[in-house]
């Protein structure tokens, strides 16, 4: 169906058969905004068509997984699936259609390939308006991030049918022509004015939601932004969450959420901080990532005219970075740590020291850690009645190996050796196999996570002193259940958890702990923070026989009997006055109070 030729606009083709026989290549009528014919489209109602989602998934499966369109689809030589899906480890050439649908459903839209990304992502125009129909249904408002649809009923088109296939070119042309006429008659200038978008700002107001970010540095380097202190007056909410990487670095997830006139413009990316990066390097990388992420928003403000893109040449004359298979350490990382402190006064002194090593290997399939640790504490007090000395040691070796099974399941095993003067443990050897289920795919852990983990095993313990049950050595079979829910959203953060353990030789010996914390932005400038924990303890089998004297209690040299622990915290934060905070003034920072008391 040829498009009408416009001034300075070439004639372009639109056909259901594609271009040059390709089922994927289409040419659509288009006019550049800066062309002479652009004004002819001003004020016209824009609409589009979407494909039957069932047909779209079946087509993607046959083409990209089964490779039926071999003339136009490139198949990865080792993966056996289309190149465009090779980056997703979950797709395999032998997978069933049901498994294919499950995998597609688990991939977020902002990470999805164009062949199965939600179609509304392609159909919101610069004004945020959308009117979507179907060749075999009726035109309905589609669930877009900021829908501004005009519902138009089209008579004579059948209901959606999963078995439906694309109509003939003749029928499609008739229906397109009829729909265009109905649209032209249904919409009048008053409707366009009623749906006018919110005016775009001159400067972009950004609310940065990030713990530990160098906000002073960002304000200095991005002076073209308005940094606001409440999301209610922001144009963009920048939510930054983090997770540790296998090499000991940090993976920062940037979620940019459009607000007001930018509602529906949401973007996400991940910036990885190398474990060897200095604070300055990490800070500069954070800045570059944030600048790139804000570019689409800035382009729609007056600042957009000043944006320039600069790509620095790759190091080594364009040489590519080493691929993971070139890693001579095979993903193993080693981290040594040690610290010590000492305090001296005329009649008292104390010393603390700790040291150890983390040995880690983290890949998509495996997570392994080996960790020996050593802790030592010494206190000495001189009194008129004599000298009091206290020694404490807490040493051990912990390890685990975890295998990824699916995006929702993992299995593994934990083993440790432990000794502690405070806990009355001369030596403990323990091993516990484990399994964990995650409601959400693990890749979503930075924003939401609900996991249930179960461990079962046994420990062989030798005590320093006889316990209240007259035991000096015993074997304790035990199982543990951990449930954890974490949620990070624009309104705040929520963490809830439950840890339960029970000795299997005596089911009355158990402990259960509940903990929760929440931070909620109530309204502009007002937020509330609540936290608490409650533990019921009936499994203190390691308590030493006899009463603890006053020195042991005050110096915390001995574990005391209890059947519960509890704690609670509450906080409010309210800010009023100016919500803009672009000014940086570092004078006399950090002096604070110099007084001893």
Image: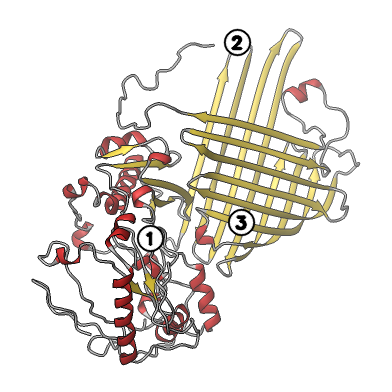
CA gap between label 3 and label 2 equals 53 Å
Q: Residue at x 65, y 45 (%)?
A: 396
Identify the residue position indicated by label 3 in the image.
450
Dot 2: within a 10 Å radius of its alpha carbon, few (fewer than 14), some, or many (20 or more) residues?
A: few
Identify the residue position indicated by label 1 in the image.
148
Q: Report helix, strand or loop for mark 2.
A: loop
Could you tell me if residue 422 is visible in this image?
no
Q: Image check: 348 left or right of 300?
A: right
Identify the residue position indicated by label 2 in the image.
346
Which of the two labelled residues, at mark 2 and mark 1, occupies the earlier sequence position? 1
CA gap between label 2 and label 1 equals 76 Å
Q: Quadrant of residue 589?
A: top left
**Residue 290: % across, % down:** 32, 48
Name of the residue lying farthest toward the right: 470
Tell which of 477 and 527 is nearer to you: 527
Q: Are marks 3 and 2 in contact (CB under 8 Å)?
A: no
Dot 1: within a 10 Å radius of its alpha carbon, few (fewer than 14), some, or many (20 or more) residues?
A: some
593 shown above or below 277? above
Between disc 2 and disc 1, the foreground one is 1
Q: Residue at x 70, y 46 (%)?
A: 418
Which of the two labelled residues, at mark 1 and mark 3, occupies the earlier sequence position? 1
Count the marks: how many?
Answer: 3
Q: Quadrant of residue 303?
A: top left
Quarter of the picture containing the N terminus is bottom left
Q: Are marks 2 and 1 in contact (CB under 8 Å)?
A: no
Q: Residue at x 13, y 77 (%)?
A: 5
Q: Image check: 392 left or right of 443?
A: right
Between disc 3 and disc 2, the foreground one is 3
Q: Report helix, strand or loop for mark 1.
A: loop
Dot 3: within a 10 Å radius of its alpha carbon, few (fewer than 14), some, or many (20 or more) residues?
A: some
């Amino acid at each position: 169906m040829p498009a009408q030729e416009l001034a300075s606009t070439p004639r372009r083709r639109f056909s259901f058969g594609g271009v040059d026989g390709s089922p994927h290549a289409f040419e659509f009528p288009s006019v550049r905004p800066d062309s002479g014919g652009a004004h002819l489209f001003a004020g016209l109602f824009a609409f589009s068509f979407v494909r039957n989602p069932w047909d779209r998934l079946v087509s993607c499966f046959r083409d990209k997984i089964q490779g039926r369109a071999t003339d136009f689809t490139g198949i990865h030589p080792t993966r056996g699936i289309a190149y465009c899906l090779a980056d997703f480890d979950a797709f395999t050439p032998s997978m069933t259609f049901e498994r294919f649908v499950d995998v597609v459903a688990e991939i977020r839209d902002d990470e999805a390939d164009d062949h199965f990304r939600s179609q509304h992502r392609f159909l919101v125009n610069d004004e945020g308006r959308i009117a979507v129909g179907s060749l075999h249904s009726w035109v309905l408002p589609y669930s877009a991030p900021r829908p501004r649809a005009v519902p138009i009923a089209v008579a004579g088109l059948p209901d959606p049918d999963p078995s439906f296939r694309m109509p003939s070119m003749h029928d499609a042309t008739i229906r397109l022509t009829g729909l265009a006429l109905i649209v032209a008659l249904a919409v009048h200038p008053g409707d366009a004015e009623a749906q006018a978008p919110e005016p775009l700002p001159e400067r972009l107001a950004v609310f940065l939601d990030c713990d530990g970010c160098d906000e002073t540095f960002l304000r200095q380097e991005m002076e073209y932004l308005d940094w606001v202190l409440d999301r209610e007056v922001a144009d963009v909410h920048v939510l930054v969450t983090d997770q540790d990487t296998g090499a000991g670095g940090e993976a920062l997830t940037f979620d940019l959420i459009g607000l007001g006139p930018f509602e529906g413009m949401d973007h996400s990316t991940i910036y990885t901080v190398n474990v060897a990066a200095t604070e300055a390097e990490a800070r500069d990388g954070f800045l570059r990532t944030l600048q790139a992420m804000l570019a689409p928003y800035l382009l729609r403000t007056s600042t957009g005219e000043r944006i320039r893109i600069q790509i620095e040449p790759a190091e080594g004359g364009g040489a590519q970075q080493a691929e993971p298979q070139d890693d001579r350490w095979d993903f193993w990382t080693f981290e040594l740590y040690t610290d010590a402190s000492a305090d001296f006064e005329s009649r008292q002194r104390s010393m603390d020291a700790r040291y150890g090593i983390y040995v880690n290997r983290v890949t998509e399939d495996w997570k392994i850690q080996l960790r020996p640790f050593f802790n030592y504490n010494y206190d000495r007090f001189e009194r008129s009645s004599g000298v009091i000395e206290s020694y404490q040691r807490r040493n051990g070796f912990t390890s685990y190996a975890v295998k990824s099974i699916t995006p929702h399941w993992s299995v593994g095993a934990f083993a440790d050796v432990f000794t502690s003067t405070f806990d009355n443990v001369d030596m403990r050897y323990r091993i516990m196999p484990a399994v964990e289920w995650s409601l959400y795919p693990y890749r979503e852990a930075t924003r939401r996570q609900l996991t249930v983990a179960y461990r079962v095993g046994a420990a062989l313990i030798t005590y320093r002193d006889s316990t209240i049950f007259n035991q000096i050595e015993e074997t304790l079979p035990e199982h543990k259940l951990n449930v954890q829910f974490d949620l990070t959203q624009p309104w705040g953060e929520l963490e809830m958890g439950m840890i339960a353990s029970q000795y299997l030789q005596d089911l009355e010996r158990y402990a259960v702990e509940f903990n929760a914390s929440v931070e909620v932005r109530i309204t502009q400038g007002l937020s509330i923070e609540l936290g608490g924990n409650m533990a019921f303890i009936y499994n203190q089998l390691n308590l030493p026989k006899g009463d603890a004297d006053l020195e042991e209690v005050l110096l915390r040299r001995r574990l005391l009997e209890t059947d519960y622990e509890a704690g609670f915290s509450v906080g409010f934060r309210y800010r009023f006055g100016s919500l803009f905070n672009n000014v940086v003034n570092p004078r006399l920072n950090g002096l604070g109070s110099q007084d001893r008391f």
